Image (cartoon, helix red, strand yellow):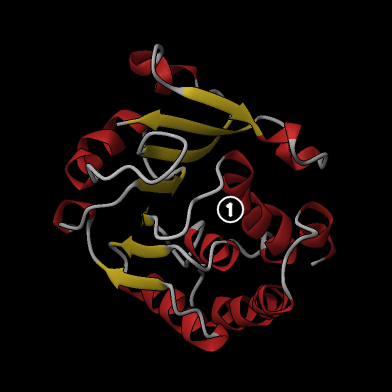
Amino acid sequence: MQIIEKYFPELTGQQLEQLAALQALYEDWNAKINVISRKDIDHLYEHHVLHSMAIGKFIHFRPGTKILDFGTGGGFPGIPLAILFPDCQFKLIDGTGKKIRVAQEVCQAIGLKNCTPEHLRGEDEKGKYEFVVSRAVMPLPDLVKLVRKNMSKTQRNAMPNGVICLKGGNIESEIQSFRKLAETAQLSQWFEEEWFKEKYCIYLPL
C-alpha cells in the first residue's frame, strides 16, 4: 500500500481503506480461482493496482464520465480507477464468468457503488461511453473495431473521447496504423520502479 500513497498522496481515508482491503480479498479469491498469476499476487499493488491507476496520471476524468473497462478479468484496471474517480461511472465486462464474479464480490466487499461488473462479451455491449480502458487484452486494431460502436458523442473531458490501453513491450506494430492519431506515454515518467520500464499508456481518440 505504501507504493500507492507514494504516488497518490491526495487519496481520502475512504479511498485508502478500499485500496487496502484489496490484498486480502484478491488473495482469498486467488486461492479459489486463479485470477492473478500466483507469483504476481505478492506484487498486487505494484503490478496491478498502481499499474491500473497509471491511467489516472494520464487523464483526470471529470465527474459524470462513463467508462467501460473492456476485458477486465478480475477487475483491472476498472476497480482501482473506480476507487480513484468516485464521481465517474464504470462498467466492467469480461467474457469469463468466474473472473467477473470475483470483480463483483470485490466491489461489494469494499462498498464500491460506481462500478458495475457484468459477464458480457465485447460484441454484446450496447452502452455508450466517453472512454474505453483496457489492460493488454487484445491488439489495439482489434479492440478499436469492437468498441467503436460504444463511443459516446457527448464530450465531458479535456481530451476527446477514445480508448486508453495499458501495454508493455514493443508497441510499434500495434500503433502502426494509428500513428498520426495515437498518443503514447511511458509509465516510467510517473513511477520510478524498475517494473514500469517498457510499460506504456496508449491513447487513441475515436
**Dot 1 surroundings within 10 Å: few (below 14), some, or many (20 or more)?**
many
Q: Amino acid at mark 1?
A: Ser
In the picture, residue 5 is in which quadrant? bottom right
Secondary element type, mark 1: helix
Q: Quadrant of the N terminus?
A: bottom right
Which residue position holds label 1?
Answer: 52
Q: Is residue 139 above or below residue 179?
A: below
Q: Residue 187, image x and y in percent? A: 67, 36
Q: Vertically, is 202 above or below 166?
A: above
Q: Nearer the viewer, residue 136 or 50?
A: 50
Q: Nearer the viewer, residue 64 or 120?
A: 64
Quadrant for residue 65, please give it.
bottom left
Q: Position of residue 162 (x, y in %)?
A: 35, 37
Q: Position of residue 73 (x, y in %)?
A: 43, 62
Residue at 43% over, 22% down: 182
Between residue 154 and residue 47, name the one nearer to us.
154
Where does the image place residue 143, in percent across and percent down from the top left?
30, 38
**Residue in the picture at 15% in, 57% down:** 126
Which quadrant: the C terminus? top left
Horizontally, residue 116 falls left or right of residue 127, namely right
Q: Residue at x 84, y 55 (%)?
A: 6
Q: Is residue 145 above or below residue 6?
A: above
